[in-house]
Amino acid sequence: MPKRTLNLFKHFAIAWQFLTIIPIAKRLEAVPVDLARSMAFYPVVGLILGGVLWVFWKGLTPVIPSSVVDLILIALLVILTGGMHLDGLADTADGLWGGRDREQALKIMRDEHIGSFGVIALILMLMAKYLALTHLPLAVKGQILLGMPAIGRWAMVVVSYFSEYARSGPGLARPFIEHLSWRELTASTLAIILILLWLLRVQGLIDFTMIILVSFLCLWYFRRKLGGVTGDCLGAVGELVELTFLLSVLALQ
């Protein structure tokens, strides 16, 4: 197998194993640049996760009330991702809402214990996603389930590219943010545009405009409050963008 093909598979495997709890390769040797290059595949990994949601939705809808199916789908996505992005949302909420200044906010975000602001953010996010799913028209629900995880993971790429790492020391997200290049940004952006056009045609581009707006609002806010982003911030962006996608689709129906 050509080396270039092997590298592409390696970067996909890194993205898959970082974003999900499902192992795809037993041993992966990766340097920081490999971690950054794997972000080109984030929308693809998201689309596969969306495919799993679509299969469960198609299989369960005929036999279980749709409101229960929607709850199962939300729980399934949390399980498949290990709740990593929700954890980031909770930590970010605790830090930004509970910290008096940048240093205290970053310190709180390091704390492994969830605070009251984190709990509130989790409850609001899960409730909002559930309610949005229950109100999606059946005509587009399958497409939205496919696209939602993809668009959320693309947003992590764009925020990483246009930001700096907020901490002075080491961190899980540092190699992703510091080594990410325009190539990964371009590849992931082309991928998400094609995915949205395939799923929603012109409406997908309108939704994409809203996603870009929310992503850069998050970027501006994190820069203002923290001087950059952390891995927790990227998880929060993913969750917020997924919800934005659902709400945008509902608004355009």
Image (cartoon, helix red, strand yellow):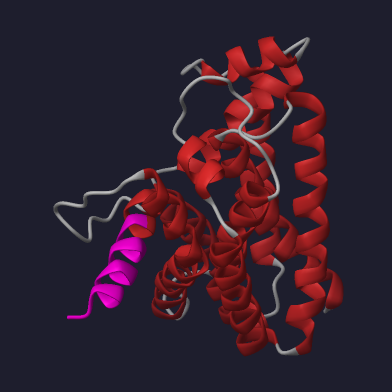
Residue 2 painted magenta: yes
Residue at the image point whose x is 22% and y is 80% from the top: 2
Point out the stretch of residues depicted in magenta.
1-14
Residue 160 in view (yes/no):
yes
Give 139 or 243, whichever is nearer the viewer: 243
Residue 173 makes an appearance in the image: no
Report the side of 70 relative to 21 (left or right): right
Dominant secondary structure (helix, strand or loop) of the stretch shown in magenta: helix
Please name the residue shown 22% across and 49% down the image: 29
* Residue 127 coordinates in the image, percent (x, y): 66, 46
Spot occupied by residue 193 in the image (x, y as percentages of width and height): 66, 78
Nearest the camera: 207 or 156? 156
Is 1 above or below relative to 211? below
Q: Is residue 31 left or right of residue 64?
A: left
Q: Farthest residue toward the front?
A: 3
| Name of the residue lying farthest toward the left | 26
x, y percent for residue 194: 61, 84
Query: Count of labels shown?
Result: 0
The image quadrant where one finds the C terminus is bottom right
Q: Position of residue 28 (x, y in %)?
A: 21, 52
Quadrant of residue 105 in the image?
A: top right
Residue drawn at x 46%, y 71% is 44
Quarter of the figure with the N terminus: bottom left
Residue 23 falls inside the magenta stretch: no
Where 215 sits versus 48, above or below? above
Residue 72's place in the image compared with 191, above or below, is above
Q: Quadrant of residue 252?
A: bottom right
Q: Is residue 148 above or below residue 159?
A: below
Q: Residue at x 82, y 40 (%)?
A: 220
